[in-house]
Image (cartoon, grey):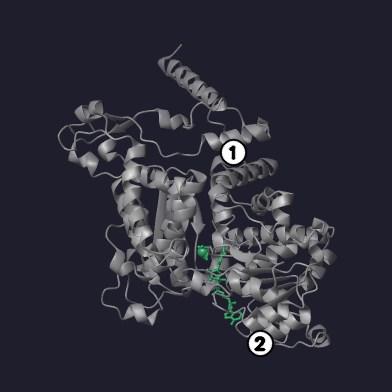
Amino acid sequence: MSLSSVLLKRLQFQRRIITAVNVYGTRSFTTTEGHRPAIVHKRSLDILHDPWFNKGTAFSMTERDRLDLRGLLPPNVMSSEQQIERFMADLKRLQLSARDGPSDPNNLAKWRILNRLHDRNETMYYKVLIDNIEEYAPVVYTPTVGLVCQNYSGLFRRPRGMYFSAEDRGEMMSMVYNWPADQVDMIVVTDGSRILGLGDLGVQGIGIAIGKLDLYVAAAGINPQRVLPVMIDVGTNNEKILKDPLYLGLQEHRLDGEEYLAVIDEFMEAVFTRWPNVIVQFEDFQSKWAFKLLQRYRNDYRMFNDDVQGTAGVALAGLLGAVRAQGRPMIDFPKMKIVVAGAGSAGIGVLNAARKTMARMLGDTEVAFESAKRQFWVVDANGLLTEARENIDPDARPFARKVNESERQGLREGSKLVEVVQQVKPDVLLGLSAVGGLFSKEVLEALKGSTSTRPAIFPMSNPTKNAECTPEEAFSIVGDNIIFGSGSPFANVDLGDGHIGHCNQANNMFLFPGIGLGTLLSGSRIVSDGMLQAAAECLAAYMTEEEVLKGIIYPSISRIRDITKEVAASVIREAIEEDLAEGYREMDGRELRKLNEEEIKNYVMNNMWIPEYPKLVYKED
Ligand SMILES: NC(=O)c1ccc[n+]([C@@H]2O[C@H](COP(=O)([O-])OP(=O)(O)OC[C@H]3O[C@@H](n4cnc5c(N)ncnc54)[C@H](O)[C@@H]3O)[C@@H](O)[C@H]2O)c1
Ligand SMILES: O=C(O)C[C@H](O)C(=O)O
Ligand SMILES: [Mg+2]
């Protein structure tokens, strides 16, 4: 037997033991990788200054000796729990002094403290985030991440991620080698042109890529050493930041047309050359480019657009949840009347997904596909969209209402949202307009006339100040018996007499981590429509009947790791079904398609990174 086959056998044996330990639930640390010591090529202060290897006061005495750390730390060795206790005591002092929750004005200060921890000790940062996800998701993600992006020039301390600018044309293929990691699993890339509902923030938009990747680590257990936030800086059309002398990005107007495409093409070629197995999530690109880039790359690269495809799935799960919450059978979905405010990348993505699902329920014929579009009324900045509109955006065209039909309904091209709601009496009012307060008192009053026993209101725009309405407004004006889901988190509403108005968070965070993880572990070379549909259906089916009837149609964020595992497993199953899965089970080399449902879930769980300090072993470089 050759040496390599002996080693291979030993490795497989060790992995089996770890998996067996895992099955019996006696250890929380499940990845095979985590049990191996980490090899470091540095010692002494260099270790303490490396956030990936630094354990601070948790270095054991033997490690301190091994790594020349004795005397460089206070003598009392702390457990990781004690370290976190100390850190949290500091953070809580800040919380006690102000309002807690998603709209706590101290959230920016909390972000600073957490970000400093991220810079010092990655393992501890992710442990704090995972164990307190409900509390800190609104700090590292929406809504605070919006504020962070707006104030990025002042907040910038250390770079995190890579910046590819229009100045780097011709250099990207070599630049990618400046990134230290030989393996990158997930890239989230933005060009900063539409950050949440805050518009063009140029280079400052990198904050959103960082925030999304924090959720990839926390929810999907993607190894934080293998994530890469990317900003493609092709200029900005935001006149305010263009004039700001402290702005950190290129101070020129955005590239457009072929020049713009050439930059994005070069970036894609470069990252896929260095990391052929990476998945690239496009985030917060203005609608003008979001669809074009998706069509351009989706058949050749492992990529997806979160705002178009992730949002579509989350909204679809919400719409199906609303049908269930109304006590109707799912098959009633194609009868729902849906008014959508906003026809950008997010709105159109939702409309397409909902239309396709309705058509499938109606028999998947061309006639069904044609008739399904009649369930939607789209209102954008110019009012109701009809075929009378000049220069209709081609992506929105299929949803333009017929003029005659509209007239019969008392509507016309450009009718106001309030008129549309009055006339249509929809089951669902969904907002992806980025206009805070768009669902005004009058609009919500009009929704009281809904033909549904339990209308659903989804003000999905982010961050909080861009939400189309607040839950207080919705419950107090439309009534207690509504379904409510917002993009950014809000607290539940006290309806009196012990009743609670439940606020769901209708945010793509419930899908993108599972879509990424499932694609990664399936080995699929593309992210297919079927894989996205499977993700959405998994989310839609996740809540129990009892929860749904209470108006709880999305999980609480505290369950994000569990729903992500389920979504990832569904994505893998679909990839297998479509013969796209090229991945192999790491444990013993069995082919994915031979695994049963439970085994696929275990495969997912076993490959989710969890934040525990590895033992460090020094080796000369
Ligand atoms: N909850 C989520 O998971 C989620 C996901 C993606 C996007 N979003 C949010 O959706 C919003 C829109 O994103 P986008 O990429 O589609 O943006 P976009 O700028 O491409 O589209 C905005 C759309 O809103 C329309 N609009 C503007 N003013 C309006 C008005 N007064 N009435 C009706 N419509 C109006 C515009 O005409 C346009 O069609 C953002 O706030 C974003 O944060 C939320
Ligand atoms: O970032 C979010 O919170 C959701 C979404 O991707 C958005 O653009 O608003
Ligand atoms: Mg987004």
Residue type at numbered disc 1:
Glu
Q: What is the crowding at mark 2: few (fewer than 14 residues within 10 Å), some, or many (at least 20)? A: few
Q: Which residue is mark 1?
A: 582
Disc 1 secondary structure class? loop
- Name the residue located 62 percent from the left edge and 40 percent from the top edge: 581
Give the number of the disc on residue 213: none
Q: Nearer the viewer, residue 472 or 134?
A: 472
Q: Tell me the distance, in whole angstroms, between the alpha carbons under discs 2 and 1.
A: 47 Å
Residue 175 seen in the current view: no
Q: Pinpoint residue 257: horizontal percent, then vertical percent.
A: 48, 74
Q: Which residue is mark 2?
A: 390
Q: Pinpoint residue 512: horizontal percent, then vertical percent.
A: 55, 54
Please tell me which of labels 2 and 1 falls first in the chain: 2
Q: Pinpoint residue 598: horizontal percent, then vertical percent.
A: 65, 33
Residue 457 seen in the current view: yes
Query: Do the residues bearing badges 2 and 1 touch, measured as CB atoms within 8 Å?
Result: no
